[in-house]
Image (spheres, coloured by chain):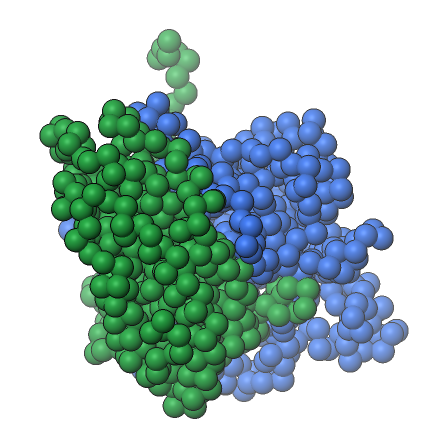
Chain colours: A green, B blue
Amino acid sequence: MATAENTAPRSFPRIEFTGAEAGLKEFPGSKSRSYNYFTPRKKRATMYEDVTVDVQPDPERHLSQGWIYGFADGKGGYPLDWTALRSGDWHLFLDPNEEWEQTIYRNNSNVVRQIQLNLENAKKAGAYRDWPMAWVTFLERHLGAWMHAEHGLGMHVFTSEQRSAPTNMINTAIAVNSAHKLRFAQDLALYNLDLSEAEIGFDGAAHKEVWHADPAWQGVRENVERLTAIGDWAESLFATNVVFESLVGALFRSHLVMQIAARNGDYVTPTLVGTGEHDHDRDLRYTRALFRMLTTDETHGEHNRDVLRGWLETWVPLSVRAAHELQPIWSQPQEKPATFADSFDAATAGLRGLLSDLNLSEPKGLSQ
Amino acid sequence: MSRQSLSKAHKKITELSWEPTFATPAKRFGTDYTFDKAPKKDPLKQILRSYFPMEEEKDNRVYGAMDGAIRGNMFRQVQERWMEWQKLFLSIIPFPEISAARAMPMAIDAVPNPEVHNGLAVQMIDEVRHSTIQMNLKRLYMNHYIDPAGFDVTEKAFANNYAGTIGRQFGEGFITGDAITAANIYLTVVAETAFTNTLFVAMPSEAAANGDYLLPTVFHSVQSDESRHISNGYSILLMALADEDNRKLLERDLRYAWWNNHCVVDAAIGTFIEYGTKDRRKERDSYAEMWRRWIYDDYYRSYLIPLEKYGLVIPHDLVEEAWDRIYTKHYVHRVAQFFATGWPVNYWRIDPMTDQDFEWFESKYPGWYNQFGRWWEEYNRLRYPGRNKPIAFEDVGYEYPHRCWTCMVPCLVREDMVVDKVDDQWRTYCSETCHWTDKVAFRPEYEGTPTPNMGRLTGKREWETLHHGRDLADIIADLGYVRDDGNTLIPQPHLDLDDPKKLWTLDDVRGIPFASPNVLLNEMSDAEREAHIAAYKANPNVTSATA
């Protein structure tokens, strides 16, 4: 035990009143209280602009000595040729969601709270007890398989892309997209765990076999795996958020699960899957803004539209096939309020609207 | 979430990954390391469902403290000497943070372990948090501290300044070259595990002693994420050690990463702590004492040495040499003197040292006064414009140093400087290890083994080359280090804001030519160069009593 004898005397730093507060003196520069090295989009810079713009430097903006470390080929930093798309000024892109750390944690924590509250209430109310067995099987197999797709995109498409785009604004938007996907995949997995423990005959391991071997899912798995294999960051972003998410993601989440769950006695699953749709809406906002900037670029717009048309020709057929291979699962629930044809029409209408926003015409094969 | 349910939940989310059969993820970032024989090692478990609310709560505490600091008018009591150095520090640090986020997919590409992938993906989000929370702290300083000039130009200045470039290694080193060298050994095993201790723990404590409790609030919140990052790095390191073929690369990378972190981080943080503080209590730990505790004991002895039994070759010699440079060779003091010499091309003000400072330095670093005392007296004497040029251009017995081609801190321990013709250019290096880094390590072959993924040192590495032969006033104007009246300089060699006549302007520095030591070195004949190098190494660079 410490005693007066063996406790060394302590001293403390002296606090002084220094008068180092804003406005106490006037001198050149004393009122210069905004970041002055970029032009804000509006009259005053937003918090988002202040904490994001120019944090990743660029030889075309201020970086006078260039990149000081490079890869083996000598390229450093964020090479512009990591995508076939071009821009007169990549820095014009600002994320319409204005994501920075506070928005990331507030939004995702709100989702976490919403889901946890819903799941707690569902457990308390015994909400899973009266589900038809066909619906239990539908969830264990198909919602279970879908969580792999979300995880694969989060980990091997978006996380990877956020290293590669040329500005901090683009990379940060993509990093947040990645966080959404990874969180949503985990939410689905933990929901799967809850259902496994609910004593309703839910097989929590069935999803693995379905994802690997069920013919209905092999087109989706192939599509996801091929998306992870793209080297061009903008191509993988476009092929994922514009093509796959419209034709397969929204098709499954919004135009199937969200439409049929309630008719099968399930008011819980839509609240969870709805968060994935909410994330997707948010992520689509920045995706639309980015590609619209590129397709309307004064100098490179035509080149970019050509490249994007090529990417549509590659990726639309793959996603259309993946969507059609999923068709059998529409008939598996007991209640079937939505037909595949209706759902697919809604998904393609979404893609058409998006392509129209991007000044891109409808690719061949979309009407299959 | 209870520990049991966390463990169960974590086990469940491991079911999300799968072995692809149609196509495998693109290998955008290569490595010369192999993980074929590596047993999978798990990092700390983290579920996003608990992660997001935890971080939100941490954020709420940070932002609550920020509100409190403004309402309580913290800036009445912050030391200007301290805050001025934050203009440099906070211009640098958000870039390494965001670079760490960008580095995560490089490690994910390289390491075949889904458990590690999850940890790295969460780290990616952490790093976005760190970068933007630090930018926001700086924004608050700009809004509430008496002199916002320098904060207002922050990211531009970081990108075009000699000191910003030194700091930029501590970010670019994470994102280029061999994926494991960059994103694991340099970033996580050395930078995060060793040097964040001085960055995010020792420095905030000094901030508090200088009246600033917001830096500790933000940086301790940041540091609380680091244990997970350290765990990510440790898992990958253990996996790499499992393959004998990696041992040589690990030895190379640990030597490079250790030495470069020492050169860069100790230069910057050592200067901030020793020359930014007004706390001169004798009981206050010096940077050397902090380093001994946080780096030597906690990192080297407790973390690195135990890894020897797994076959890791520890750079004992470089750890001892770093300590010797800090304590015996006065590395930090030489860097601080260099920063103060170069004050006209800074974007912060540097307070002169006083008798009280002299006394403290002498007690902590015996011999300090003889080496540096008279120079700081000259700095004080020459601090106002009108009768003299900036100290770098007056004869005070200080020879402007050559810059190290590798770490870009000047060759300040002059007797250790190495000069060599590399890639057809005469280059100067601060030490044997920096010379080895450029000439041997960052090459496509290492000790007879091809290393096709190893990075390269690139760019215009000597800052002075960009400005060789130009007028100092033009350089400062182009850099943008001028206040909003268009004439008064942002940098000043004192803190006196009361009298406009005491503030240096472009007019006061016009007509002063600026020269690059490296350009001049390359223009010399062989005989001239040899004589110059011998004289440089022999010059103690001490201001005489009669200067």
Q: Residue at x 55, y 50 (%)?
A: B21
Between residue B39 and residue A352, name the one nearer to us: A352
Quadrant containing the N terminus of chain B in the rendered view: top left
Between residue B68 and residue B370, name the one nearer to us: B68
Q: Residue at x 44, y 56 (%)?
A: A219
Compared with residue B527, is residue A230 higher up or lower down, i.e. above or below?
A: above
Image location of residue B200, percent across then percent down: 43, 44
Image location of residue A293, percent across then percent down: 35, 80
Q: Residue A48 falls in which quadrant of the image?
A: bottom left
Residue lying at the far bottom of the rendered structure: A299
Say if residue B260 shows up in the picture: no
Quadrant containing the C terminus of chain B in the rendered view: bottom right
Q: Residue B337 falls in which quadrant of the image?
A: bottom right
B13 relative position to A198: left or right: right
A179 relative position to A261: left or right: right
Between residue A276 and residue B345, name the one nearer to us: A276
B149 relative position to B312: left or right: left
Q: Residue B322 falls in which quadrant of the image?
A: top right
Residue lying at the far left of the rendered structure: A125
Say if residue B111 shows up in the picture: yes
Image location of residue A128, percent across then percent down: 18, 32
Compared with residue A292, is residue A131 higher up or lower down, i.e. above or below?
A: above
Q: Residue at x 45, y 65 (%)?
A: A318
